[in-house]
Amino acid sequence: MSETTPESAQGTTRKVRVFLVDDHALFRAGVRTELDSITDEVEVVGEAGTVGEAVAGIAAKLPDVVLLDVHMPDGGGAEVLRQVRPTHPAVVFLALSVSDQAEDVITVIRAGARGYVTKTISSQELVRAVCRVAEGDAVFSPRLAGFVLDAFADRPGSAPISDPELDLLTPRERDVLRLLARGYAYKEIASELFISVKTVETHVSSVLRKTQLSNRYELSRWASDRRLV
């Protein structure tokens, strides 16, 4: 299985095949319904509620991406990874959990997951995250990337880390946000970046809209969580 999104003989990109692993049946049903209703980029090909069901189902379906819960009664996501990855290394795992604890993040990443997003993620962001890990990127919810960077700082050849929300911003918007979070006034940002104050205001308005935040103080906290400052 290629690390890039598979294509048919006609050159048409096919759907990313997804397998759901979560011990809550209602949650699995909700994710399946959401993914089926908002996009034709992904296709849910199977689901499981236990480690044993997950290992057998993944081996049978050979999905592109497994959406994997971290905590389950019979061993959790890390155990699924330990049992599946040695025999099916091409299957990509994306952890999807209510937990944002560093220990949980590091455990599943060390076990072989390609990314980690929390269940507060929107349906559209989840689709983007699934497609990104299928293409070979590493994807993390806000602030979780820092845990991974700290844990793997000394490891060479680390995979690039992606933040679905941060990816919405243009490079110039990131520059403006970084200076804004450092306490620069609009006039100082304009001088630093050689743009007009009006352009700075336009970029800030765009960042506020994309992040759905209300003011520069919330933006500063948002930028700090992503280590932009």
Image (spheres, rainbow, N blue to C red):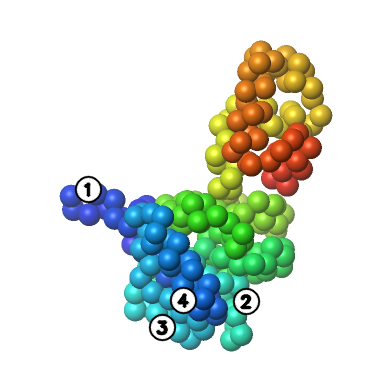
Q: Tag 3: Cα neighbours inside 10 Å, few (<14), some, or many (≥20)?
A: few
Mark 2 belongs to which amino acid? His
The spot of residue 49 in percent (x, y) is 50, 81
Tag shown at residue 84: 4
Q: Gap in Å between the C-alphas at discs 1 and 3?
A: 31 Å
Quadrant of residue 78 within the rendered picture: bottom right
Say if mark 2 contacts mark 1, CB within 8 Å: no
Earlier residue among tags 1 and 3: 1
Q: Gap in Å between the C-alphas at discs 3 and 4?
A: 9 Å
The residue that appears at 38% across and 62% down in the rendered structure is 36
Is label 2 or label 3 in front? 2
Say if mark 4 contacts mark 2, CB within 8 Å: no
Residue with the most extreme left position: 10
Q: Secondary structure at mark 4?
A: helix
Q: Gap in Å between the C-alphas at discs 2 and 1?
A: 39 Å
The spot of residue 93 in percent (x, y) is 49, 65
Q: Gap in Å between the C-alphas at discs 4 and 1?
A: 30 Å
The residue where tag 2 is placed is: 71
Earlier residue among tags 4 and 1: 1
The residue where tag 3 is placed is: 56
Give above or below for 207 relative to 199: below
